[in-house]
Image: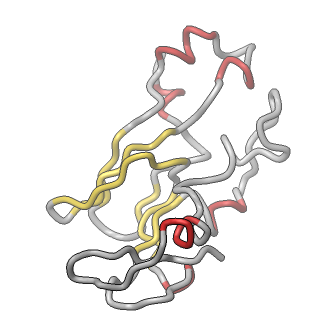
Amino acid sequence: MTDCTRWASRSNPHRMSAASAASQIRGPGAPSNACQSPDRRKEVPGQDPCPLLAEHGGIWKFDENKLDQKQEDGVHFATGLRQMPAIAWHDGGLYIVMNSRDQLNVFWPALFTAQDNAERPAEPMFRADKAGVNFGWPYCSQVSAQV
């Protein structure tokens, strides 16, 4: 399981070095393009159900007043998110920009061209207002909706 590191702020004087913090945090998202096994191989379909979703591809919310929390201590607030390069809480909602897919024309050349890969949306923005939201990765993508 992934460790949750609490970053220092004005209201939280607990500090740790950037090197120590980086060693305890995984990147935000899933370690796969589309839950494939093996990953990133031409025309390999994604797994259904996707075993990565239990620990990846989502956002967990933690108690800001507790130290040394583990992933299982958090609330699985949102799932179905491949990678989240931008996350912000605002006006009671969680805003997320997701990197939803890579290299469509490389992995599925019979279905997508290099132009499709360049022009079809790959970074949709979402809002989650309550825990339990599922944004669909890896089972659906905004790519299929663009014709």
Question: Going by the image, does 81 lie left or right of 125?
Answer: right
Residue, x 52% and y 38% (percent of image)?
100
Task: Please tell me which residue lies in front, 94 or 2.
Answer: 2
Residue farthest to the right, as pictured: 38
| Quadrant of the image containing the N terminus | bottom right
Residue, x 62% and y 62% (percent of image)?
53
- Say above or below: 139 vs 88: above
Residue 14, located in which quarter of the rendered image? bottom left
Residue, x 19% and y 59% (percent of image)?
90
Which x, y percent locates residue 41? 82, 33
Which x, y percent locates residue 34? 67, 42
Residue farthest to the left, as pictured: 91
Question: Going by the image, does 49 lie left or right of 22?
Answer: right
Which x, y percent locates residue 68? 50, 88
- Say above or below: 3 vs 121: below
Task: Please tell me which residue lies in front, 54 or 68.
Answer: 68
Residue, x 65% and y 23% (percent of image)?
104
Which x, y percent locates residue 109? 74, 15
